[in-house]
Image: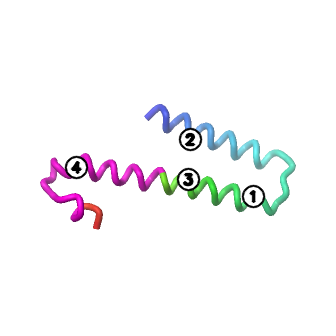
């Protein structure tokens, strides 16, 4: 959990540095969409790990849980 908090702080710091520096405005949408894309990968990984952990507790197959 602490790793995720630290990564969140790092992302906020990166966003702050990118938006306060003189940047070409055409680069900002790419930066924000790249960060959002990275978050989607993290959330998808969390989802499948959670499904693996509850599979045995709920007595439901993996295929049924990810539908």
> Is 60 positioned to the left or the right of 26 in the image?
left
Decide: is 8 above or below 54: above
On the image, the x and y values in percent for residue 31 come to 70, 55
Q: Are marks 2 and 1 in contact (CB under 8 Å)?
A: no
Count up the numbered dots.
Answer: 4
Residue where numbered disc 3 is placed: 38
Spatial CA distance of label 1 from label 4 is 39 Å
Q: SS of the residue at dot 3?
A: helix
Residue where numbered disc 4 is placed: 54
Spatial CA distance of label 2 from label 4 is 26 Å
Q: Which of the two labelled residues, at mark 2 and mark 4, occupies the earlier sequence position?
A: 2
Q: SS of the residue at dot 1?
A: helix
On the image, the x and y values in percent for residue 44 come to 42, 56
Residue where numbered disc 1 is placed: 28
User: Of the residues tagged 2 and 4, which is closer to the observer?
Assistant: 4
Spatial CA distance of label 4 from label 3 is 25 Å
Magenta part, dominant SS: helix
């Amino acid at each position: 959990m602490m790793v995720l908090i630290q990564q969140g702080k790092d992302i906020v710091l990166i966003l702050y540095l990118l938006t306060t520096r003189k940047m070409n405005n055409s680069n900002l949408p790419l930066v924000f969409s790249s960060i959002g894309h990275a978050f989607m990968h993290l959330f998808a990984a969390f989802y499948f790990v959670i499904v693996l952990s509850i599979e045995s507790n709920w007595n439901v197959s993996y295929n049924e849980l990810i539908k």
